[in-house]
Image: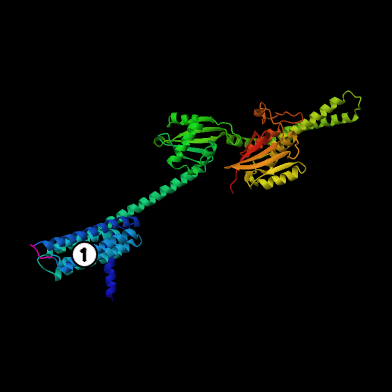
């Protein structure tokens, strides 16, 4: 046995299913808060306009002699409607919260005022009833269906009540009555279905926009963290984007993360025109749709890891061009790593073959020295043979130390504590100052760093001049941006200008006892760890500077 409640639920569900079916909507979607605010504000202005119009119409009728003047109730009703419309408009503009509840209250107010005005005004009932359509249309566009359905029934009931109990010459005819009822339902249905389609399109656009924003953020993140530098050029040959690597490689005095406004990008272009005129002219004069390559030499800088760049133009066709900036020194570092790995077996076998006869020569010369007396004229030659065999043995040891190295086993090194232990272990009696104002970390192979510093320290201690009250060697650790400087400074006379270009060449030495491989090995180990050694003068003191990237934990 079905109860009235069951019958009501069945009818309601059937009507709802048919409503959704005819509208071709699977699930109701509410308009966005932004659209509710925009359309709701427009409707509130419309309500105030209609209220003022009704007030002016009532005032005009009160002065007319052709019709009966409006009653006091009608004037009070219209005046109150104007005041409430103004209050609702002000509240809706100032209070964005609970916008749908404010609109629901306004729609109910409109229906009630129109119903009373229809009963007491001499204006045609059909003309007043047509105003219901605007209210129904707005409500179905902005409010949930569960709210607008009672509003629709309220309007239909009001019109039916007026047709039944207030039947006069201005009342609706049966034809007009049924036509109005059908039109109200049709307007509500069309407004709701159009609103659903607009909302679905709006949601799709928002999702698409969010996906584009995610993709754009992902692309920017990838570009920003690329090892190679990137400059994005638009069709007018203006820079619209650059990454951190481009900032470092081109030595730009700007933060690439903040170069996202036309003003800052203009400053970047001005800097390029001043410091990199060749690069600027190159990418502005080449055909942007044809790949091209520029080998670009930077001005030598003791504070920079890179001084040779390869710049490739990648066409973006109708969207501009992409400049990929590659660090040639970094490529050499990778080549150096491969060389270190490949020389091991060959060098070990060669050293083994050389050491056997070399050991026999060294031993024989030592025996000859021991048996020779002071009067032996060959003793000096024996000493030369012995010393030279020792020198050749040192060269073999240096070559083996290079060839035994595999790919760098890089670790995080905190420099201040590392150098404290290093000096204590290797140079406990030397006068060495360590200047490190704050903890600085790098990512480096500890064994490589140790061999580099041993070579640089031995070289500094060998050439320094002992001055009273000063350290023989100073190790200064500093940081500028993302670059770390490790300076080994001595009081020596320094390297002649003519010898500086050959300092890191193999077998180049100014010492009779040196092998000429110390600085070459140190530079090789540095390049294998993406670092560089430079020679410079600091306050008339000789300095070897190890330049390495800072490690951010």
Point out the stretch of residues depicted in magenta: 65-69
- Which quadrant of the view contains residue 144? bottom left
Q: Residue furthest top?
A: 377
Lateral position of residue 317 relative to residue 428, left or right = left
Q: Residue at x 71, y 46 (%)?
A: 420
Please give the count of numbered marks on the rendered protein: 1
Q: Residues within 10 Å of mark 1 (few under 14, many from 20)?
A: some
Lateral position of residue 160 relative to residue 546, left or right = left
State whether the magenta stretch is mostly helix, strand or loop: loop
Q: Residue at x 26, y 61 (%)?
A: 86
Is 66 one of the magenta-colored residues?
Answer: yes
- Which quadrant of the view contains residue 537? top right
Q: Residue 539, image x and y in percent?
A: 66, 35
Is 51 one of the magenta-colored residues?
Answer: no
Q: Residue 1, image x and y in percent?
A: 28, 76
Picture layout, residue 309 above or below residue 409? above
In what element is the residue under mark 1?
A: helix
Q: Residue 83, image x and y in percent?
A: 25, 63
**Colouring rule applied to residues:** rainbow
Picture layout, residue 508 above or below residue 85? above
Residue 240 visible, this angle: no
Q: Label 1, on which residue?
A: 79
Q: Residue 213, image x and y in percent?
A: 42, 48
Residue 108 visible, this angle: yes
Lateral position of residue 497 relative to residue 166, left or right = right
Q: Residue furthest left?
A: 66
């Amino acid at each position: 046995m079905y109860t009235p409640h069951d019958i009501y639920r069945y009818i309601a569900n059937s009507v709802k299913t048919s409503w959704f079916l005819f509208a071709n909507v699977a699930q109701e979607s509410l308009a966005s808060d932004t659209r509710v605010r925009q359309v709701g504000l427009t409707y509130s202005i419309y309500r105030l306009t209609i209220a003022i119009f009704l007030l002016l119409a009532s005032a005009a009728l009160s002065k007319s002699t052709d019709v009966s003047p409006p009653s006091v109730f009608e004037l009070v009703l219209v005046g109150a409607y104007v005041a409430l419309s103004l209050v609702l408009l002000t509240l809706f503009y100032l209070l964005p919260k609970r916008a749908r509840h404010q609109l629901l209250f306004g729609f109910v107010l409109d229906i009630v005022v129109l119903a009373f005005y229809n009963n007491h005004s001499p204006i045609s009932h059909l003309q007043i009833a047509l105003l219901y359509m605007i209210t129904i249309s707005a409500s179905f566009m902005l409010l949930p269906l569960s709210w607008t359905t009672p509003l629709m029934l309220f309007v239909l009931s009001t019109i039916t009540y007026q047709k039944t109990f207030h039947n006069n010459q201005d009342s609706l005819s049966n034809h007009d009555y049924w036509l109005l009822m059908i039109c109200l339902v049709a307007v509500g249905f069309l407004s709701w279905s159009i609103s659903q389609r607009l909302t679905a399109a709006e949601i799709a656009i928002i999702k698409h926009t969010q996906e584009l924003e995610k993709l754009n953020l992902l692309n920017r993140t990838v570009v920003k963290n690329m090892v190679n530098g990137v400059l994005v050029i638009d069709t007018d040959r203006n820079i619209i984007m650059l990454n951190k690597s481009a900032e470092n490689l081109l030595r730009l005095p700007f933060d690439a993360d903040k170069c996202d406004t036309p003003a800052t990008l203009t400053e970047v272009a001005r800097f390029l025109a001043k410091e990199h005129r060749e690069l600027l002219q190159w990418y502005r004069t080449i055909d942007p749709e044809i790949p091209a390559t520029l080998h670009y030499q930077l001005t030598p800088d003791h504070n920079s890891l890179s001084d040779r760049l390869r710049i490739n133009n990648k066409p973006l066709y109708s969207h501009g061009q992409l400049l990929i900036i590659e660090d040639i020194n970094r490529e050499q570092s990778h080549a150096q790593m491969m060389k270190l790995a490949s020389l091991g077996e060959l060098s070990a076998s060669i050293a083994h073959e050389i050491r056997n006869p070399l050991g026999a020569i060294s031993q024989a010369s030592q025996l000859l020295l021991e048996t020779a007396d002071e009067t032996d004229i060959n003793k000096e030659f024996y000493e030369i043979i012995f010393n030279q065999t020792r020198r050749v043995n040192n060269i073999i040891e240096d070559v083996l130390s290079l060839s035994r190295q595999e790919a760098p086993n890089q670790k995080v090194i905190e420099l201040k504590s590392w150098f404290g232990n290093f000096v204590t272990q290797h140079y406990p009696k030397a006068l060495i100052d360590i200047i490190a104002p704050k903890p600085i970390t790098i990512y480096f192979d500890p064994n490589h760093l140790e061999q580099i510093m041993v070579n640089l320290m031995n070289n500094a201690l060998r050439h320094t001049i002992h001055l009273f009250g000063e350290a023989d060697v100073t190790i200064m650790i500093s940081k500028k941006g993302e670059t770390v400087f490790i300076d080994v400074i001595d009081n020596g006379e320094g390297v002649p200008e003519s010898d500086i270009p050959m300092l890191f060449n193999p077998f180049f030495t100014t010492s009779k006892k040196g092998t000429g491989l110390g600085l070459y090995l140190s530079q090789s180990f540095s390049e294998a760890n993406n670092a560089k050694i430079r020679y410079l003068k600091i306050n008339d003191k000789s300095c070897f500077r190890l330049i390495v990237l800072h490690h951010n934990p």
